[in-house]
Amino acid sequence: MPNKIAQIPMPQNEPIMGYMPGSKERKELKDELKRRKSMVIDIPMFINGKEVHTQDTVEIFPPHDLSHKIATCHKGKSEHVSKAIEAALNAREKWANMHWEDRASIFLKAADLISGPYRSSINAATMLGQSKNVYQAEIDAVCELADFLRFNVYFASKIYSEQPVSAPNIRNTLEYRPLEGFVYAVTPFNFTAISGNLPAAPAIMGNVVVWKPSSVQVYSAWTIMQILREAGLPDGVINMISTNAAETSNIILSHPDFAGVHFTGSTPVFNGIWKTVGDNISLYKNFPRIVGETGGKDFILAHKSADIDVLATAILRGAFEYQGQKCSACSRAYIPKSIWDQTWEKMYEALKTFKVGDVEDFSVMMGAVISEDAYKKITRYIIDAKANPNNIIMYGGGYDKKKGYFIEPTVILTKDPKSITMVEEIFGPVLTIYVYDDAEVSMDSILHLVDTTSNFALTGAIIAQDRYALEKMKNALTNSAGNFYINDKCTGAVVGQQPFGGARKSGTNDKSGSQWNLLRWVSIRSVKENFVPPKYYTYPYMSEE
Ligand code: NAD
């Protein structure tokens, strides 16, 4: 066998394309949107390298254009879950034994397909299926997904080269084995990149996967599956199923070969998965890995020394990009009274220019929220907030679902910093602001308030120019966020730069897109070889005087 030790250079983050009027990429994307809208795509399940069609189908519409059908998705039953598990387990031996560099080539190729020939396709799928504007689609479906794949290959190479010391006459090595069994990947609707990364990360490390995407993200999930296929992913390594979530979990989480779950989604669903794993623990051959990134109630805290433009921009982008449907979205802000009027003036002037509508119009800032369920849930919070005498609706508060699930960017000013919209995850374009009297109230008490208001600890940002204030705020909020920002918005983590994840009820904080996440998908074998082994059982100290 020809040998080598491959060097995997640190990747560069995929550059974000501009989509300026007249640009080539803009034209290609517009053409692709048109092409996709002129057809109804068939979305099968994908088990053991085969497309699986069923009689049970659901129709898919863009959330911003509910009268235009774009796809038909084939739904499966419990037998498909079992078939996906079987396919994964059958593929395991060959996949786990493939040299990691050859496995890596598949994912590096997929990344290049995404940033190259499939760029407009995966962007258009994300815009139509999840109602992202062009920029939000580009940073997610292209840049972040390509980054996940490239950086994870690099991180895998770093893990594999991590080896122990050896004493004289001995050779010690660590072997990074894939988990013994299969991994269950459960993905959320809001990031195409997360949807691709959760099955791909364990697969890069040699694991086989059953992947259940969100039922409202299957349109771009199917594009990911097609790309992985074209990149050379062998049959059975990742099996994509569209099945009832609870039923799928019941089957998978009671299988003896269940080896781990890679989850991103809401905290209650993750709680349920964890509990079931606990209840079933005696059924498994191994203790399963449980990795879950969950909800957030992310904050921006301003100090009186804040630059007003920086503050207003961080809040507006953090709260309303992708309609607030980011786990990291700013949904509570704390602003000192001494700078509130100026801050609000800036925010208000900007909000008046926000365009909400069909994301195929590139001048639109916000599209629709993802589904009828999301629309109902978010508007319920708005209705209740309007009825609360402690609140003033400073902006928005309107909604309309005639054409799509549109909700205005909504700003609530509250006198009660523990009111429900300051505490619970809403996952929509709703921001609540608490103005604190910086002449009366100590910074310590505000910091305590920010730290203790919610059960989550995903992202948070502090805005100040006073260096002593920044230091104090950063230290006091040590456990309030797994991703912490200074003079920036609380969204937009970049793979390789800000590994992502939160603590408390925001997840296991295994930092997606990092070496630490990949470590969860291997089980280490320590191998000691003795070159000069002893040949008799006694030790020298046992000799007679
Ligand atoms: P969700 O919890 O409704 O769904 C997530 C996934 O879980 C979907 O695939 C869904 O079908 C599945 N699911 C639902 N019930 C299940 C069950 N009983 N067993 C197994 N799977 C089940 O979340 P969503 O609406 O898709 O996404 C929004 C949530 O995800 C928010 O809470 C957001 O904060 C969180 N999120 C977190 C991060 C992060 O990195 N922390 C990133 C993105 C989204």
Image (spheres, helix red, strand yellow):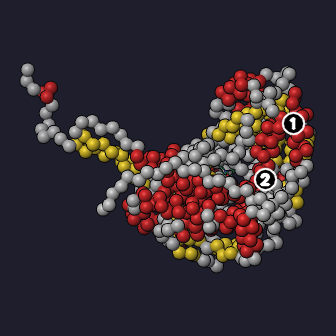
Please tell me whether mark 2 sits on a helix, a strand or a loop. Answer: helix
The part of the image, by quadrant, that contains residue 335 is: top right
The crowding category of the residue bearing disc 1, from other C-alpha atoms within 10 Å (few below 14, some 14 to 19, many at least 20), is many
Q: Quadrant of the C terminus?
A: top left
Percent position of residue 443, x then y: 77, 24
Percent position of residue 478, x then y: 64, 31
Q: As drawn, which residue projects farthest toward the bottom?
A: 55
What's the amino acid at mark 1? Thr
Q: Quadrant of the N terminus?
A: bottom left
19 and 175: which is toward the camera:
19
On residue 323, which mark appears? Answer: 2
Q: Is residue 57 left or right of residue 5?
A: right
Give the residue at x 80% y 31%. Answer: 306
Please tell me whether mark 1 sits on a helix, a strand or a loop. Answer: helix
Give the residue at x 53% y 63%. Answer: 109
Q: Is residue 280 left or right of residue 336?
A: left
301 and 157: which is toward the camera:
157
On residue 343, which mark appears? Answer: 1
Residue 25 appearing in the image: yes
